[in-house]
Amino acid sequence: MPYSPSPLPAPADPASAPAAADIRLVVTDMDGTLLDDDKRPPAGLWDVLERLRERGVLFTPASGRQYATLAREFARAAQGMVFIAENGTYVVRDGVEISSDPLDRAVVAEVVAAVRRLSAAGTDVGAVVCGKKSAYVERTDAAFLAEVRRYYVENRIVGDVTAVDDDVLKVALYDFGSAERTTAPALAEFAGTHQVVVSGEHWVDVMNRTADKGAAVRRLQRELGITPAQTMVFGDYLNDLQMMDTAEWSFAMANAHPEVVRRARHLAPSNNDDGVLRTIRRVLGLPA
């Protein structure tokens, strides 16, 4: 049941913080949440990750980014870390797959065909077919490839993205305009059987209905014996909605989409104000 968000009162200083909550799992989105608008991690991240590890708290990035990209970004702290990649369709720990939820190849072909039609009609959009091994694109212009390579360190240009030899986890569409107003409505035919998720201002993801960040978090909780009361999650956009329902300590960033703010229990400072780390320190009583 959704809760109205409320700001978590901050203590006057770390020493006056209440007894630390029994948090065992911290899950955070990346873009617009942990990272600032320039895609930079907050200062102090590695120190906080080390302190969480010392306390036996599992820190888990949950992102629309691919696993290879997340593993590279957290390389210095990746040992033992669980990565929820591709919006929950691929979960990996220490290079070993925990779970995945690939799309049927016929659906991949249908989504790509719809994007090709949309592009031919004048929308500035391109498809990224996201596999376990790599991301695959047909569009080759520099502007599009620059956006793809920000999120998919493993990427290949191919003649036909529907014919790749890989398990396809999702099809991501990059719209140089508004994904929420243009590309997402154009994919409405898939919404009845699959998830069509606006994951950013310019991104839309098509995935199986059974796949999302929330489902991935719940499976992780079951496997590790962690309760919602012991879970903290952070998010800012529509692909984080289901994740808000998995934790009693659910935080929408101050910069979050209004739907995420309505779904979360609490508000955190913005991504440009180190909101994730400031909240972790406050709730767990860590020194600043």
Image: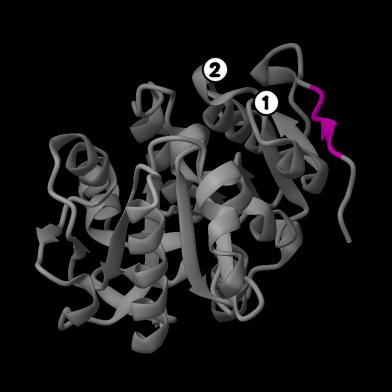
In the picture of the structure, the residue carrying the numbered disc 1 is 254
Q: Residue 274 appears at what percent x and percent y?
A: 52, 22
Q: Is residue 272 magenta?
A: no
How packed mark 1 is, by other alpha carbons closer than 10 Å (few <14, some 14-19, many 20 or more), is many
Relative placement, left or right, of 23 versus 145 is right
Relative placement, left or right, of 49 versus 159 is right
Compared to residue 4, the image places residue 282 above or below, namely: above
Q: Determine the secondary structure under disc 2.
A: helix
Q: Could you tell me if residue 85 is visible in this image?
A: no
Compared to residue 114, the image places residue 273 above or below, namely: above
Which residues, given as a range, are shown in magenta?
5-9
Relative placement, left or right, of 262 versus 182 is right
Q: Which mark is residue 273?
A: 2
Q: Residue 248 appears at what percent x and percent y?
A: 78, 53
Q: Earlier in the sequence, mark 1 or mark 2?
A: 1
- Give the quadrant of the N terminus: bottom right
Which residue is depicted at the point 29% across and 66% down? 129
Residue in front for this viewpoint, 188 or 268: 188
Which residue is depicted at the point 69% across and 13% down? 13
Q: Badges 1 and 2: C-beta atoms under 8 Å apart? A: yes
Compared to residue 141, the image places residue 216 above or below, namely: below
Q: Which mark is residue 37?
A: none
